[in-house]
Structure formats: structure tokens, C-alpha cells
Image (tube, helix red, strand yellow):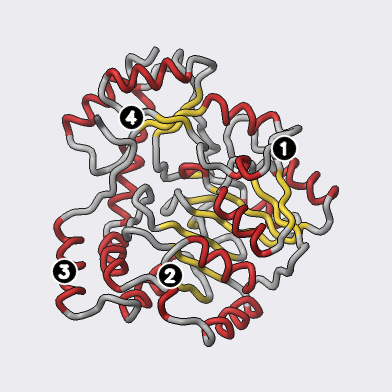
Amino acid sequence: MIALHRPAIQRRELEAVLESLVNDQVGPGSLSQKLSNRFEKLLFGDESRVFRDRLTAAHFLWNTLGLVPQDGILFSPLGSRLLVYSAQLYGLEVFYADVQAEVPVLDCQSVQKALNDHPQIKIVVADYPYGLIPDVGRLRKLGVMVLEDLRWGLGGMAEMESVGSRGNAALISLEDDGVVCAGGGEVLVLRGKEPVQRFKQLLQQTPDQVFLSDVNAALGLVQMDQLPAQVARRREMWERWAQTFRRDSGHLPVQATEFEPVMSHFVFQVPNGVTEVIAYGRKKGVVIRQAFQDAAHLSHPSALEGLANAASFLGRTLLFPLYPALSTNEQKALLSVLSSLP
């Protein structure tokens, strides 16, 4: 079976990890800090750190932004379930807004309505579903803080700016389905004088064990060196996949020209027959999976009430393999399946 995703780890990455082990650089240290600095420079941040996991990074983030229990936080119902869980643990009140009709990113009009109805909302979480780009520029103009949740999409561009560089803060996943893989970890990038001051105060009381190990950071650093090539490769592959995709099989979420996403998967919607398409892929040796299976709405059964666009995407969106580690024969097989989907 051709897997849905596979990290692009080559010999040079493994050699970097081996060198780290030989030099006794195992726990958090200089390589972890170096990786943090790379992301800070890439995304024009004022401060950054790489944590071992997303939950820890999110806890630091809520503290750093000056949020207090009972403050409101706004999500897409298709966003990160783990971030919703973290916000609830911290005591934040969770609200939801709908996504756009054609692309499953936050709809600014729906966000504005939520802000009018719930003035306690202090921050909006703008997620990048499988690389698709929300309009962070418009969200910032609504007068609240914006967190860019880059579980996917690193390397994308929005209105000539790097995604992850436009909000008050950004979280970037280093898991195996991301553009950059460090075998786990989460980058937190901050902007603004007051958040940075709070963050530095928190760090003074923080044990090193919460930060990414140098072993993982060594892998991440070599992957960062390959980021431009990875981005170009993913975009080139997406174009070939899109040209082959049968338009009578479904719909592709294509964005306006000022947004240049880097997709983690080939995403498409079908009018019906989701189970049939998944079964067809299995028959042909290809993993096709329904999207948003770990999304925020699962934490609140009523999250989708009145949010028709999100509900529509939830029931008919599929994920298809798209990653540079695919061999030539695997790519041929995938294009063959795309051209013959039921």
C-alpha cells in the first residue's frame, strides 16, 4: 500500500543525527537553540523556542499572550482538537466560526459575527488545513490577536509574505506529516515586546526537559536546509496531480492567486460516495482517508450548529498521498488512480 504520508528523510539527515549522538549531544542544547533561531529568522519573529510537544508549546503560548481563564478563544470547527483541549485546560472559553464556502479556512465575516456576539474573545486561531491559507491580514484588522496554527503549510506565501509571519504568534509542527520533520516537536514563534518579556520570565523557571532534544533538532536542521527544494517539489507534484484529477470525480479547493499554499496532502471534495472512493483506493493499493478526523468539533458535539460550510467539508473531503519521498513508480500508480476515481 502507498501510505498517506511519509517523511522525506534521506541519508544526510540520518548522518546528522548520528553525529549528534557521537558528540554526546542528546538532550536539549545548542542544536535545539540553533533550530529555534532558524525558525525565528524565517518567520521574522522576535523570540522562539522548540518544544518537545504541541501541548507544552500551547501552554506557554496562552501564558505568554497574557490570556487568563474565562477569556474567549475562537477556532474553526475543523481546526486542531489538541489546541482546543489545551485551551480548555487553561480555562479559556472556546467559540467557533464557520469556514469559507469554497475553501475550509476561517471565513472573516463569520469571525466578525462571533466577535460581535462574544466580546470576551481575545484571540483567533487561524489554522492552515493541509496547507490551505487563511486570510490572516483581514483577521488582524478585526482587532483581536491571531495565532497562526501551522501544523501544515510551512513554506507557503500569502500576499508576498511567508505564512507564519503575519500573526501575533505561530505554532509550527515538526511531526512526520509536515514539510519539515524532526521526528516530533513544536516551534513557538512570538512577536511583540510584552509577550517576549513574559516568555523570557517563564523560561527562567522552566526545566530544559520541555525543549526539543538535540538529536531531533539535528534532523530538523538538515530538513530546514532542504525546505526550498521540498516546497518546490510539493508544488510541482500538486500541479501534476491537479491536471490528472478528474473534475467529474469531485472538486479541488483552489485559492486566490495572492495565496500560494504548500499542501501536505492532495485534498479534494466529492459530492457523495466517500466510502466508495476510499474502497477504490484500497483496491488499487493506495491509502485514501477522510479529512478532519481529529478536528476541533470532536471536543464539542454542538460546534457545527449553524456552521453549514464546515459541516459540508467534514462529510465529503478526502486526503490523497502527496509527498516528495514517493518513488517514480509510486507516482505513476497514484496518477493512474487519480485519473480513474469513481
Q: Nearer the viewer, mark 1 or mark 4?
A: 1
Q: Nearer the viewer, residue 222 or 283?
A: 283
- Earlier sequence position, callout 2 versus callout 4: 2
Q: Amino acid at mark 2?
A: Val
Which corner quadrant holds the C terminus?
A: top left
The image's mark for residue 18 is 3
Q: Residue at x 66, y 30 (%)?
A: 309
Considering only vertical position in the picture, is 150 above or below 59?
above
Q: Amino acid at mark 4?
A: Val
Q: Are marks 2 and 4 in contact (CB under 8 Å)?
A: no
Q: Quadrant of residue 197?
A: bottom right
Q: Which residue is mark 1?
A: 302
User: Alpha carbon of mark 2 to alpha carbon of mark 4: how far?
Assistant: 31 Å
Q: Are marks 3 and 1 in contact (CB under 8 Å)?
A: no
Q: Quadrant of residue 323?
A: top left
Q: Label 2: state its secondary structure.
A: strand
Label 4 crowd (10 A; few <14 / some 14-19 / many >=20) = some
Q: Label 3: state its secondary structure.
A: helix
Q: Quadrant of residue 180?
A: bottom left
